[in-house]
Image (tube, rainbow, N blue to C red):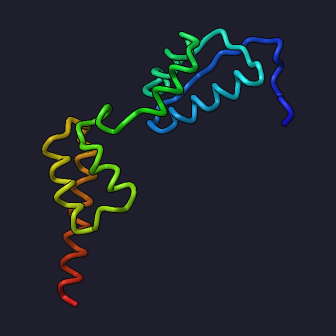
Amino acid sequence: MEIKLDLSKEYAIALEGGGAKGAYEIGVWQAFEEVGVKYCAVSGSSVGALNGALMAMRDLDKAVHLWENLTFSQIIDVDDTQMKAFFDKEMRWNEWPSFCWTWRKSSKIAASMQNHCGICWKKWWMRKKFVSQM
């Protein structure tokens, strides 16, 4: 791979928010370290600010450890076992509403996520209603 950056210069890094983009940003930082890209300033918003703070400390190992060991329950008030079952598709479609209800009742996440659960509930209810009429 040909490096298209001038490795004799220092760069300013701007990181954006967006949840999972944070893990990507750490991968880019690793690649920069491997090829010798130097930076003298970092800024970021949301998860980019978290990564920016880690980059300012110049502790790549700590950042990688953080991202490799991050769980849902460290970010939002959910049960990690249920989240794993959901993402591994081990949770059946008729179990989703009770999971969603538990999540809505106990969670401290933003209203937009709670609205998303409401949409999922409506989709589940319509599917159940349609299937029961067949």
Residue at image coords 73%, 24%: 34
Dividing the image into 4 quarters, which one contains the C terminus?
bottom left
- State the image coordinates of residue 125 (x, y, percent, origin top left): 19, 70
Is residue 9 shown left or right of residue 45? right
- State the image coordinates of residue 59 (x, y, percent, origin top left): 56, 14
Q: Residue furthest bottom?
A: 134
Residue at image coords 29%, 62%: 91
- State the image coordinates of residue 68 (x, y, percent, origin top left): 48, 33
Q: Residue furthest left?
A: 105
Dividing the image into 4 quarters, which one contains the N terminus?
top right
The foreground one among 40 and 89 is 89
Seen in the picture, residue 66 relative to 85 is either above or below; the reply is above
Is residue 84 shown left or right of residue 79? right
Counting every numbered tag in the picture gives 0
- State the image coordinates of residue 133 (x, y, percent, origin top left): 18, 88
Seen in the picture, residue 99 relative to 72 is either above or below; the reply is below
Is residue 39 shown left or right of residue 134? right
Is residue 47 shown left or right of residue 94? right
Residue 35 found in image quarter: top right
The foreground one among 89 and 43 is 89
Residue at image coords 74%, 19%: 37
Residue at image coords 22%, 73%: 126
